[in-house]
Image (cartoon, helix red, strand yellow):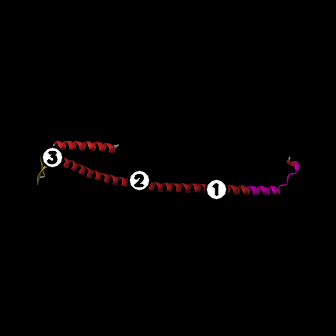
Amino acid sequence: MQKQVRLIVSVALTLVIVIFAVLNVDNAAINFGFAQIQLPLVLIIIGAAFLGIVITALVSIGQQNDLKKQVKEADKRVAEADKAQEVAVKTAVAAETDRMTAEMNAALAEKDDQIKALQRRTNELTQQQGQMPKPTPTEEG
């Protein structure tokens, strides 16, 4: 849409310049300080318009190059920030993994100790039952 608007504005300005130039066909003098030339006013107007277009294009190209540099620098900073964030996330994940692994190992060691204690208790109870007289059928019920 912007390109269409620019095209319409450009065509309109060109028409204004052409109409103005056609209406002013008399000769005019241009004084450069060191030389003076006589040209038809049409050529002076068209030349001035062309010179304005060239100057505008050069300034625009310079601005576009500056913007491209800024975008490139911004992209570089974003890439660096992404890389730093990725490293930070990996570090945090590794630290959390280590913490959880240590926590799980501690819980497993505690459970192993509980299992060993229960096995000892079972062995003790089994030994005690072996020393106790077996109940007779009348004592059971």
Q: Is residue 129 left or right of residue 44?
A: right
The amino acid sitting under disc 1 is Leu
Image location of residue 135, percent across then percent down? 86, 52
Residue type of the residue flagged with mark 3: Leu
Mark 1 or 3: the one toward you:
3
Q: Do residues under tags 2 and 1 come within 8 Å of each other at their CB atoms?
A: no
Residue on which the image places disc 3: 41
Query: Above or below — where is 15 with respect to 105?
Result: above
What residue appears at the point 55 percent right and 55 percent down from the top-left corner? 97
Q: Nearer the viewer, residue 28 or 33?
A: 28
Q: Which contiguous range is marked in magenta?
A: 121-138
Seen at 64% across and 56% down, the residue is 108
Mark 2: secondary structure = helix
- Gap in angstroms between the C-alphas marked 2 and 1: 44 Å
**Residue at mark 1:** 108
Q: Is residue 135 part of the magenta span, yes or no? A: yes
Please state the horizontal and vertical placement of residue 34, each as a whole percent of the image. 11, 54
Dot 2, how many residues are within 10 Å of its Cα: few (below 14), some (14-19), or many (20+)?
A: few
Residue occupied by mark 2: 78
Residues at marks 2 and 3, CA–CA distance in whole angstroms: 55 Å
Does 28 lie within the magenta span? no
Local SS, label 3: helix
Q: Nearer the viewer, mark 2 or mark 1?
A: 2
